[in-house]
Amino acid sequence: MTSLRLQAYRQLLLLDTLEDHSIQDYQSRWHEAQHTVKTLFQRLDTHGETLPLEEKAELLLTIFVLLQVGYRNEALFARAVETTYELLSQLIETADPLEAPNCRPLSVVRCPLSIINYKTHLLVHLYQETQDEELLPAIDHLMSTWQDDTMTEEDHYLMELFQLAETA
């Protein structure tokens, strides 16, 4: 999934300059991305109850990135936003109240789960889609913990997309 997301980020940020950017190529990438998104949603629908939270988060993150390739499909974006908010609610339900007494959907920072990067990335994509300013404190807090020497390639791409969303 990570390599698929990295390829999509490169396309979004126009980093693959050697590729053909013709309309036919653009439409081909869009069709491929839409097909993959529908397949990933089908996996969530079919196995969602039994998938670990980490896998659900990775699937949703991949869906968000792929949806940005090509033309917007508002229905799929709305479904991704709704499903992500549902996942955040599941994170709250599974959090130990003694370890995370203030764990709410928008302050998932304190949730003691092993998917901190997925949460950061998902929150950024949610913010980009919803402009929900209640997400900003959590995003700022999570990104403030990142250090250049430990950031992944995907983290760098996400940071760039977040900065573009903030200036828009």
Image (cartoon, rainbow, N blue to C red):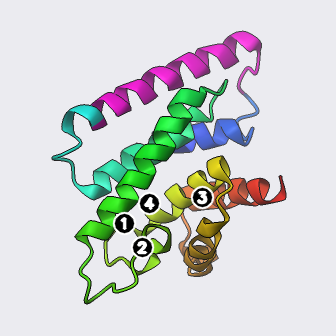
Q: Residue at x 67, y 24 (%)?
A: 71
The residue lying at 60 percent from left, 21 percent from top is 30
Q: Secondary structure at mark 3?
A: helix
The x, y position of residue 35, in whole percent, is 45, 20
Whether tag 1 and tag 4 are in contact, CB under 8 A, the answer is yes
Name the dominant secondary structure of the magenta segment.
helix
Q: Which residue is mark 4?
A: 118
Q: Mark 1 sits on what residue?
A: 115
Q: Would residue 2 be seen by someone viewing this image from the given angle?
A: no
Q: Amino acid at mark 1?
A: Ile
Residue underneath mark 2: 104
Type of amino acid under label 2: Arg
Residue stretch rendered in magenta on the structure: 19-44
Q: Pointer 2: residues within 10 angstroms few (<14), some, or many (20+)?
A: some
SS for dot 2: loop
Q: Are marks 2 and 3 in contact (CB under 8 Å)?
A: no
Q: Quickly name the residue at label 3.
A: 124
Q: How far from the left and from the top, in percent, is residue 109?
A: 46, 76
Which x, y percent locates residue 6?
55, 44
